[in-house]
Amino acid sequence: MLILAILVTASGCWSSKEIDVLAFATSAGVDRNAETDSPIVTVRIVKPEAIATGGQVGLSPERAFWTVSSEGRTVFEATRNLLQLSPKRIFGGHGRLLVIGEDAARQGVQAYLDFIDRDGETRRAVHMLIVRGETAQKFLEAEFELSPAADLGLETQLAGGRAGMGTIAVTLNEFLIALETPGLEPVASAAEIVVKIPGGIAGEVERSEVKSSPQVGGTAVFRGDRLVGWLDPLDTRGLMWVTGRVVSTVVVVPCPTGDGEDVTLEILKAKAKMEVDVRGDSPTVSVFVDVGAALAELEAYINPLDWPGSVDQLQALLADAVEGEIRSCLHKCQVELGADVFGFGAAIYRSSPAVWRRIEGSWDDMFPLVPVRISVRAEIRRSGVSGRSLRIR
Amino acid sequence: MPLARSLIENRAALAGAFGNSPDLVLRDLQLSPQGPEGLLVCLNGLVEASLVGSSVIEAISLMDQEDAALTDPAKLLEALRLRYLATTEVVEVSSMRPLLRRLTSGSCVLLLDRSATGLAVHTAGWRERRIDDSPSESTIRGPRDSFIETLDANVAMIRRRFRHPSLRFEPLVVGRATQTDIVVAHLLGIARESIVKEVLTRLRRIDIDGILESGYIEELIEDQPLSPFPQILRTDRPDRVAAALLEGRVAVLVDGTPFALVMPATITMFLTSPEDYYDRWPVGTFLRLVRYAAFAVSMALPSLYVALTTFHQEMLPTPLALSIAAQRRGVPVPAIVEAFLLELAFELFREAGLRLPRIIGPAITIAGTLVIGEAAARAGLVSPVMVVAVALTGISSFAIPVYSMGISIRLIRFPLLLLSALMGLFGLATGLSLLLIHVCSLRSFGVPYTSPFSPLTPGGVRDSVVRAPIWAHDRRPELVAHAKGRVAARQMPRPPKGGPGR
Amino acid sequence: MTDGQQLSGRQLVALLVLMRLEVATIILPSVSCVDQPRESWVAALAGTLAAVPFGLLVAALARRFPGQTVVQFGRAMLGRLAGTFVAFVYVVFFFLIASSVSREVGEAYVASAMPETPWFAFAAVVLAVAAVAAASGIEVIGRAAELLVVAALALFITVLVLPLDMMRISNLLPVLERGLAPALPASLISFGLFGEMIAGWMLAPYLDYPHKMGKYLVSYVVISGVVLIAAILAVVAAFGPTANSRILPVYNLARNVSVARFLERVEMIPLAIWTFAAWVKIGLFLWVSAAAISQIAGLKDYRPLVFPLAFLAAAVSPVLHEDLFGLLDYLSWDNWPVYACTLQVTLLAVLWGAALLRGGGGKAGRSETKRAEGHARPGRGGTGQRPAKKGGHTPGN
């Protein structure tokens, strides 16, 4: 017993850190200094009072976070240099977003990612964002009106998949797995900064004008660890159809009555299957997509008697729309970017490793030429609470 | 020392035994003009005066002529004993020791000249407390009687619950100066004889000047005096004692205190309340689970809080972490010290609340803790979340039905707090591990403290974690008692065949 | 404890399961010390299947010598010198594991939750707790294990199930792309760890139903095997090819859990499991070592040996491995597992061989009765938990 007591008290508490000396960094960003090629690390630190449930409904006059940036020869060194600028110890344990500037991404992110993965405080579940046309630093300085801590808000959007039609959510874990998996190229969410005009915003803002606001949409495409291009939101959706990541989105198709009105279909479920045919030396890929939708909005009036026929037409239109998006995305990725973000190569590897080993070396050249057969099956299951739309007398 | 034949000698001896005590009453009697002189001795306050008057003095005066004419003291005493003295118990005494014992138990003693034998007449009737609700273990549903300080009354309360003669009481006397009466109760044939024998052996071993409370005995006979955990159950509820006896346990009742001891005791006994059995079984099960949770909370919550906020902040949900961080701004002391201070303050309030007169006691306890805690938080001395944590812990410890266990847990809380302050969750885990090792090595009269969980007896678990319906209670704790078969088969109520309503 | 100590079958299984689980929770060497984590589950399955007959043989050997520990029957069959040598090898095997595990725990804590603290602090404290447990007697350790194992298993499974959204079956394919043979060497890892059940040769005299030992050992293998394979599958499904970059796979898995945006970061669970499992395992092995040594040396009581052994283990632990990488390398298949498997199989073979040749031991009765008192086993003279003046406890309880 005595020994135990001595041991325990002598061990002290090296690791103890009081909670109020911590600065909670909810987002981190990496840029590259173009001249010196050294990383610039930025962190966004949330002020606890802004989030504390003290019952404050209105937004306080001050901004809810600080950003701190510093530079170093490596990411870790830059992070350490941050400590000089912050009186509180920066704590990455609650990080939500990892933002990388376009410039840095184009040069290759492997160097940056190692520290982040190795450090015990970061989680692999952080979302990766690549900032288009700007630096991560600027991005982290942008904020939302509605949610003072933009990170939590963004993360909710991404995780819930409801940020809009063409947003893909990629965690660090997925990114790293894609990097190490043969035949699959990584992607990350694309983000950009929208410059706001002060005064033109709904909702009271007592702070000094909100200068810029973050927005996520689209995809950043990589080859290896280098950024090579972007997918706009519709193409992103194409990617999501194929990889089965569609959560909740809407597709607008022209109304079958042919008078220029539109029908909006809400997608309830989308499943995709990829099959690879490796006979011979050139593989072909077949993608089967199964879409379930609900009729969400009907701009024109359709006679109920025509209903079954109309539904068939709508389903065909939906399938066409989906196939179109996929084709567009395919074209972009295969031809323009040459990045196998769908994982065709990985699919080949999974089904017949021997074949993959043969073609692995030349996959970069083969990928753009791989014929892809798309087959979409769409089904409209529901129509909201109304049966038919309004009929104007 | 035998009595003398001479009344004068006896009288002198008695006066000498008690000195100048004002409660010694020596009343001369003349049974009959020719008969020997008599002396009635009793201790004022211990006897029921009217009883002495009616059953002894009056009875003597009502002797019929023939008996009154007897001159032989022996015959006279015989006659009185068999025919006239009007109480339940009349015993012959012929030596000083038993005579004094009877006197101090409330009998009055009748001595005659020329006789070395006297009669002790049971006339006990001191003021005793009314049988009332138990102040420490009250229930909503269930019997309201609780033990009082008189052994006979307590024995009666138990006897009333067991009509079957297999209920046995073994009397003992313990304590040199106090000569306290003790009774060991058990159900013959159901309790294991080895355990009963062990209890008696340990009790007989006791050599101490006085036993004032059953707690003294508890400490003198328990297996592990150095453990923070109680190994003998103390209760002042006869229904709890009766239930324990039915399970085959042994109870010890001590004169002078309402608290009886029940042994062997296992850890689950300290977390159950008799009320579990009086309500229906889902309620009982639910409340039991709540109590187990309270057990854990009251032991570990402050430690967990300190460990998380000082060492492992990444394990808190982000909004909570930020909230706590915001609250702790400006608090001058580290979280550990804050926790210690608040815990000590809470204990202080609780103790103060107990000592205060009953009128203001409860007010101070509740008001004191929360209001002062609130004020301290407002003043920035402590963070509100810590006040909440400490208050929650304290309240949980009240949910534990057996007071001795609740106190033990409060004690354990402090070392755990210290350990978690030193090494975070690892320290907490270490503390809990040591506690676990200790608990696993405890035995109460040979029964492992952790049964029925380990060694695992499925029947036992049925009655500890959940409260199985009464018609499923077929087994007694295997290590404690012999017989199974408490409940006949197929006792579960079923609707009659052919549907209800017939 | 006095000689009245008994270990129930459940307790034995609980002890062994926790012993196995400890390594799985911390490092899961089948995944983190392997080149191709995708195939680890095949290797683990192979190791599990091989462990079943091994367990039966271990139990059968113990059954031949009812009431005797390996020290006793080893010496009886191989002669004093050789038998003592075998026993000594046995002791050293377990002692080194005890020391190594304490190092593992220390390094794990440093790598995960509390990086500033020197690992030795954790190792020393865990060793101290284990020593207390071992000194309290095997029955206490057994009871504690019985109480812990259910919760530990349930929590472990929960940790594997919660991150379901992180897992992709595609990470598990293709299976065995290079064929079965390259995957098999890794099975030595799991087999070697299963083989630690030869600790049962010291525990056998305490069992309440000794003839059921085979059943107990097989249940241990099956339970731990299932859990182990589930863990491997979960980790690989979640982390894909990056799985073997994780030093603490299960911990990392728990870290990244996110359910309903509230239940996040449940890494407390693996931390708790491995802390408790660690002292159970180390305590068990310290007890085994101390008990065996006391039997070899003919001492009456094993207890005074426990704390010195613990000290020794603490002193040895920095020497065993250079650093964390040394530890990981040590656990990969071509290091400790080879040595462990060889030792275990050799011991089994040697002892069985001697038993068959010498015809030693008897067929243990297939009787259903509980073991009677009075068998030779490491004693514990002197004062017990209950001071003698209390009149002792009720025997047979």
Image (cartoon, coloured by chain):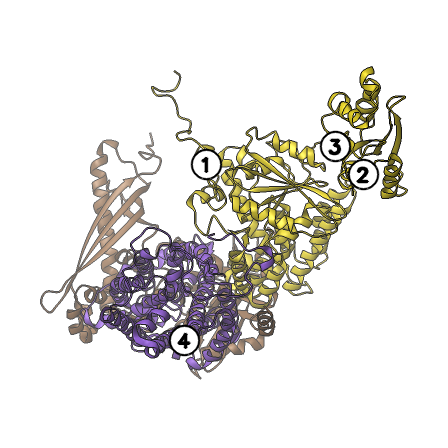
Chain colours: A brown, B yellow, C purple
- The residue pinned by badge 2 equals B3
Q: What element carries label 1?
A: loop
Q: Which residue is drawn at 50% across and 40% down?
A: B286
- The residue pinned by badge 3 equals B92
Q: Is residue A190 left or right of residue B441?
A: left
The dot on residue B90 is none
Q: Please identify, in this view, whether the residue under mark 2 or under mark 3 is nearer the observer.
A: 2
Disc 3 marks a residue whose amino acid type is: Glu
Disc 4 marks a residue whose amino acid type is: Leu
> Mark 1, residues whose alpha carbon is within 10 Å: few (<14), some, or many (≥20)?
some
**CA–CA distance in space, label 3 to label 4:** 77 Å
Q: Please identify, in this view, whether the residue under mark 2 or under mark 1 is nearer the observer.
A: 2
Q: Please identify, in this view, whether the residue under mark 3 or under mark 4 is nearer the observer.
A: 3
Disc 2 marks a residue whose amino acid type is: Leu
- The residue pinned by badge 4 equals C96
Q: Are marks 4 and 2 on the same chain?
A: no
Q: Residue at x 66, y 60 (%)?
A: B340
> Mark 4, residues whose alpha carbon is within 10 Å: few (<14), some, or many (≥20)?
some
- The disc, 2 or 1, on the residue closer to the chain's N-terminal end is 2
Q: In this view, does A14 lie to the left or right of B88?
A: left
Q: What element carries label 2?
A: loop
| Residue B84 place in picture, x, y as percent | 77, 21
Farthest residue, direction bottom: A36
Chain that bears disc 3: B
Pick the residue in front: B338 or C201. Answer: C201
**CA–CA distance in space, label 2 to label 1:** 57 Å
Chain that bears disc 1: B
Total tally of numbered discs in the picture: 4
Farthest residue, direction front: B72
Chain that bears disc 2: B
